[in-house]
Image (tube, rainbow, N blue to C red):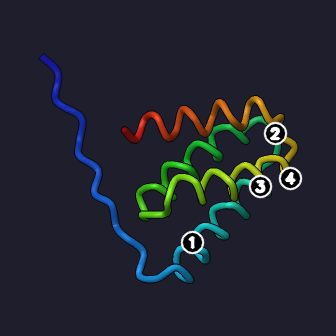
Amino acid sequence: MTEPPALHTVRPVASPAEAMKRLEVLARAVAKTPPGNRNNVLYWAARRALEEGIPASAAAAALARAAGDAGCPPKETEATLRSAFWAAQ
């Protein structure tokens, strides 16, 4: 038998302004990522945003724009975000 998955604790952000600041940092990381690692960084950023207590809708919108800026095709971006948010359930 395998160990059950670890429970994730959500650390809610202190304020909407703090949430936007954290999301901007994550989006910048995605936007600056070169080809070859974009999906990994996008997935990481989406998971991190959720762990920080940022609403999935806000995270998805900001990170999808950043992925587009990095040159990630829309279908890839959508699939990666869907995977990241599904894994959080």
Say what amino acid the circle numbered 2 marks: Cys
Q: How many marks?
A: 4
Say what amino acid the circle numbered 4 marks: Asp
Say what amino acid the circle numbered 1 marks: Arg
Marks 2 and 3 sit apart, C-alpha to C-alpha, by: 9 Å
Is 65 placed left or right of 41 in the picture?
Answer: right
**Residue ID for mark 4:** 69
SS of the residue under disc 3 = helix
On the rendered image, what quadrant is the C terminus found in?
A: top left
Marks 4 and 2 sit apart, C-alpha to C-alpha, by: 7 Å
**Residue ID for mark 1:** 22
Is 65 placed left or right of 80 in the picture?
Answer: right
Contact, CB < 8 Å: mark 2 with mark 3?
A: no
Marks 1 and 3 sit apart, C-alpha to C-alpha, by: 14 Å
Residue occupying the point 49% across, 40% down: 85
**Residue ID for mark 2:** 72
13 w.r.t. 62: above or below: below
SS of the residue under disc 2 = loop
Neighbor class of circle 4 (other Cα within 10 Å; few <14, some 14-19, many 20+) is some
Q: Which mark is residue 50?
A: none
Q: Which mark is residue 66?
A: 3
Contact, CB < 8 Å: mark 4 with mark 2?
A: no
Neighbor class of circle 1 (other Cα within 10 Å; few <14, some 14-19, many 20+) is some
Residue occupying the point 71% across, 54% down: 30
Q: Position of residue 68 (x, y in %)?
A: 83, 47
Contact, CB < 8 Å: mark 3 with mark 4?
A: yes
Q: Earlier in the sequence, mark 1 or mark 3?
A: 1
34 w.r.t. 52: above or below: above
Contact, CB < 8 Å: mark 1 with mark 3?
A: no
SS of the residue under disc 4 = helix
Q: Position of residue 47 (x, y in %)?
A: 49, 49
Q: Earlier in the sequence, mark 1 or mark 4?
A: 1
